[in-house]
Amino acid sequence: MTILSKRAAERIGQTRLFLLDLDGTVYLGNRLINGAAAFIENLRRRNIPYVFLTNNSSECAAGYVKKINRIGIPAGRDNVFTSGQAAGMWLARKKRGALVYVLGTAALRRELASYGCRISDGRGRVDFMVAGFDTELNYKKLLIACELLDKGAGYIATNPDWVCPVGGGRYIPDCGSMCFMLERATGRKPLVIGKPRPDMVRLLCAKHGVAPGRCAMIGDRLYTDIAAGKNAGVLSVCVLSGETTAADVRKSTIKPDIVVRSIDDLNPAVSSGPP
């Protein structure tokens, strides 16, 4: 177990809003990481709000709520905010009723449609080509995406993650890898909506009325989770239960405020406060 310094334990204990990544932080595949359920129970006991802030756009928010509850952690719609939702909000602000082609899952298409986007089959011009973590990817979808980008369609991506951890030391290609493939084919780079941009973190701080200095972002990726926390001015906590290793932290220019082996190492700090 990682032993927190007195200052780190105090900062965790003083936090009044926790934002948590999911893949590699709370679970791996369908297996809860040790201590994750106890961490959430400690927050609930102390009436401290928590939001699962995920870049994984392969599932819609409602789907994440079902999965989180199924694996043993209580969550409602207010406890989940995805990069797919953030993309839908961005598109709604940019152009009401935008016509979009989605290089993503059926769940992402439903999520974007819920924000008023019109979903295209790729024939003809579109306003935006939206890339997500597409676990239903096929070559036809790549061809359509390349054609639309070559024709000048607006281009956004839900997240820049290269891989998604699935347990057993295994990883699968995520949205960042798919966007790199498109970049090599078309020369186009997307505007990334999710982490490491600070927008999602800032929006949630404002929603809960919590100053950035009393909020913590917990995640396993330096270049998304930790960078988003740094960019938003909140406490950044890196867990080594997913993508990032201790060696990665030492080499990286992105330095977390706190590094722990897993979320379980934070339980003493969050369990010691008053109910």
Image (tube, helix red, strand yellow):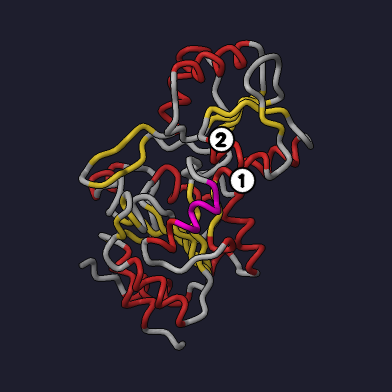
* Category of crowding for the residue at label 2, using alpha-carbon neighbours closer than 10 angstroms: few (below 14), some (14–19), many (at least 20): some
Rendering coords of residue 117 (x, y %): 71, 36
Residue type marked 1 = Ala
Q: Earlier in the sequence, mark 1 or mark 2?
A: 1
Which residue in the structure is indicated by mark 1? Answer: 86
The quarter of the picture where residue 156 lies is: top right
| Residue drawn where x is 60% and y is 11% of the image | 150
Q: Amino acid at mark 2?
A: Val
191 displayed left or right of 270: right
Q: Is residue 143 magenta?
A: no
Magenta segment boundaries in residue numbering: 60-66
Question: In the image, is residue 263 above or below residue 197?
Answer: below
Residue that carries the numbered disc 2 in the rendered image: 192
- What type of secondary structure mainly makes up the magenta span? helix
**Disc number placed over residue 156 in the picture, else none:** none
Tell whether 223 sits left or right of 202.
left
